[in-house]
Image (cartoon, rainbow, N blue to C red):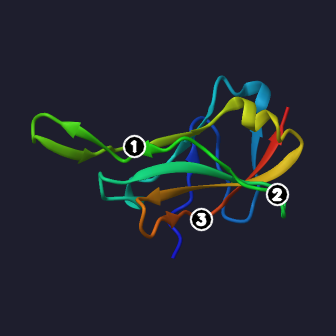
Amino acid sequence: MALEAPTLTGITTRPDDQETVVVLSKLQGDLEVCIPDSAYSSPYNEAFAILNLDKGDLEWRGKKIPTGQYNEDIDDVARTPNLKVYVSREEVKRHVNKTVTLCYQIGGENEPQTSSLLTLRIEW
């Protein structure tokens, strides 16, 4: 079963099968991809964004972000709430006037889990 689809900071996301429009000229920096808190519980994993390009093309994978941080108060690693991963503005720009799908993946070396897809239409 797929994890809940991501949302985007500052952009209204559409229901499952509808395109979410990303207007590059309004994007201030990198595309911020929000991972629902319900999608992960372990602070010992990593998460990253994935853009699935046109069929047959390779997918783009973003930088891995840890799902937890060391917490001195408990002397252990604690889960990071409101986790965000990013798609660089340059990568988004490469897909102007195209439709791509976006998801995220969470996990360690064993059994990573992938989210449901969010369909993006990139416009200038």
First of labels 3, 1 by sequence position: 1
Residue lying farthest to the right in this orientation = 97
Quarter of the image with the C terminus in it: top right
**Residue drawn at 54 percent across, 41 percent down:** 63
Report x, y in % for residue 88: 66, 33
Does residue 118 appear left or right of residue 57 in this picture? left
Q: Nearer the viewer, mark 2 or mark 3?
A: 2
Q: For mark 1, does the 10 Å Cα neighbourhood hold few (<14), some (14 to 19), or many (20 or more) residues?
A: few
**Residue drawn at 84 percent across, 63 percent down:** 56
Q: Nearer the viewer, residue 33 or 16?
A: 33
Report x, y in % for residue 118: 67, 57
User: What separation in Å lies between label 2 and label 3 (alpha carbons)?
Assistant: 19 Å
Residues at discs 3 and 1 in contact (Cβ within 8 Å) = no
Eyeballing the image, is 43 above or below 39? above
The kind of residue on which mark 3 rests is Ser
Report x, y in % for residue 61: 63, 48
The kind of residue on which mark 1 rests is Asn
Residues at discs 1 and 2 in contact (Cβ within 8 Å) = no
Does residue 96 appear left or right of residue 31 in this picture? right
User: What separation in Å lies between label 1 and label 2 (alpha carbons)?
Assistant: 31 Å
Does residue 67 appear left or right of residue 100 in this picture? left
Q: Could you tell me which secondary element the residue under label 3 belongs to?
A: loop
Q: Which residue is mark 2?
A: 57
Q: Which residue is mark 1?
A: 82
Eyeballing the image, is 32 above or below 119? above
Q: Which mark is residue 116?
A: 3
**Residue 40, quarter of picture:** bottom left
